Amino acid sequence: MIIDFHTHIFPDTLAKKAKETLLRNVNYRYEPATDLTEAGLIETMDKWCIDISVNQPVITKRTQLQSTNLWAQSVCDDRIISFGGIFPHTEDYKKDIDFVCGLGLKGIKFHVEYQAFGVDDPKALRIYDYALSKGLIIVHHAGEDHGMPPPYRSNPQKFAYIADHMQGGIMVAAHLGSHNMWDDVERYLVGKNIYLDTSMGFEYYGKEQFLRIVKAHGADRILFASDSPWSNAKNEIDAINSLPINQTSKDLILGGNAARILGLS
């Protein structure tokens, strides 16, 4: 089973506008693999033999809470699992997290750049603690974002601090721990109680560094992810399959780990 743990889709009515806005933010440096619709994602999944994709929506206003999470619930089926989201700048975070849980969504995505908060701020930590206590998986954008200027709000040191203060539960740092900060991932984050996903990966960090991180962190805490539509999932899958690691490790990375934490196995 292959599970892509980090993808992005939008409602059909918003997908075209979202695609144009996001591409403009990064000066059109990417060639999107899909049109950002559910049907577009399914088409690439079928083409590249991906069994399940996990959608990761980001809420940038609290007024989006109900509409985004209700839509996320509506797209969940045997091919797509959508996480939900909350807006972190609220004192009603418990109510909002309970709403996400009540919809049966399995996790929450945070993006510190688009949501403009400190990833290791004490107010954020209490949100994580409550979400994790409710059994939700937390996924973080990690490191650089090509659409936003530095300095960036997250890095491996901050995720290491968060991991050290977690009260249990499952947290994922995308982009192999922090995009374009992989030397610091090796220095500070590997071995901590946190999962790393491979999104937007091999074209940047290379196989040798990836292998070092897998060896130090453990193949059982690495999740295949493409960040679709912003990278080509087939290239990522082919890169993982070409690695000089055993088949058991490849199977864990490509889907076994995701199936386990999503409660599918």
Image (cartoon, helix red, strand yellow):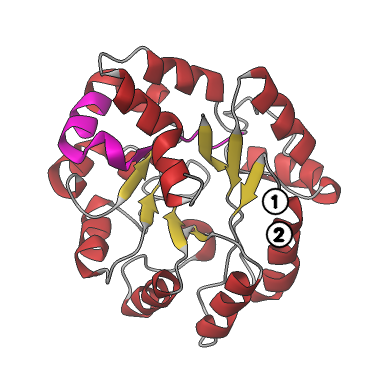
The three-letter amino acid code for the residue at tag 2 is Gln
Q: Which residue sits at x=30%, y=42%?
A: 221
- Badge 2 element: helix
Res 230 quadrant in image:
top right
Horizontal relation, residue 17 to residue 171: left or right = right
Residue 86 locus on image (x, y percent): 57, 70
Label 1 environment density (alpha carbons within 10 Å; few <14, some 14–19, many ≥20): some
Q: Which residue sits at x=83%, y=46%?
A: 12
* Distance between mark 2 and mark 1 Cα atoms: 6 Å
Label 2 environment density (alpha carbons within 10 Å; few <14, some 14–19, many ≥20): some
Q: Is residue 112 above or below residue 61?
A: above
Q: Examine the structure image and report whether residue 197 is included in the region drawn in magenta.
A: no
Seen from the viewer's position, the closer of residues 51 and 230 is 51
Q: Residue 252 bears which disc, if any?
A: none
Asked whether the residues under the numbered discs 2 and 1 touch, taking CB atoms below 8 Å apart as contact, a structural biologist would say yes
- Badge 1 element: loop
Res 186 quadrant in image:
top left
Q: Is residue 232 above or below residue 112?
A: above
Residue 222 locus on image (x, y percent): 33, 38
Residue 83 locus on image (x, y percent): 58, 56
Residue 6 locus on image (x, y percent): 52, 42
The three-letter amino acid code for the residue at tag 1 is Cys
Give the residues drawn in magenta, as a range.
Answer: 210-228
Number of marks drawn:
2
Q: Which residue is mark 2?
A: 73
Q: Examine the structure image and report whether residue 222 is included in the region drawn in magenta.
A: yes
Horizontal relation, residue 231 to residue 141: left or right = right
Q: Which residue sits at x=47%, y=44%?
A: 265
Q: Which residue is mark 1?
A: 76
Q: Is residue 233 visible?
A: yes
Seen from the viewer's position, the closer of residues 21 and 212 is 212
Seen from the viewer's position, the closer of residues 30 and 54 is 54
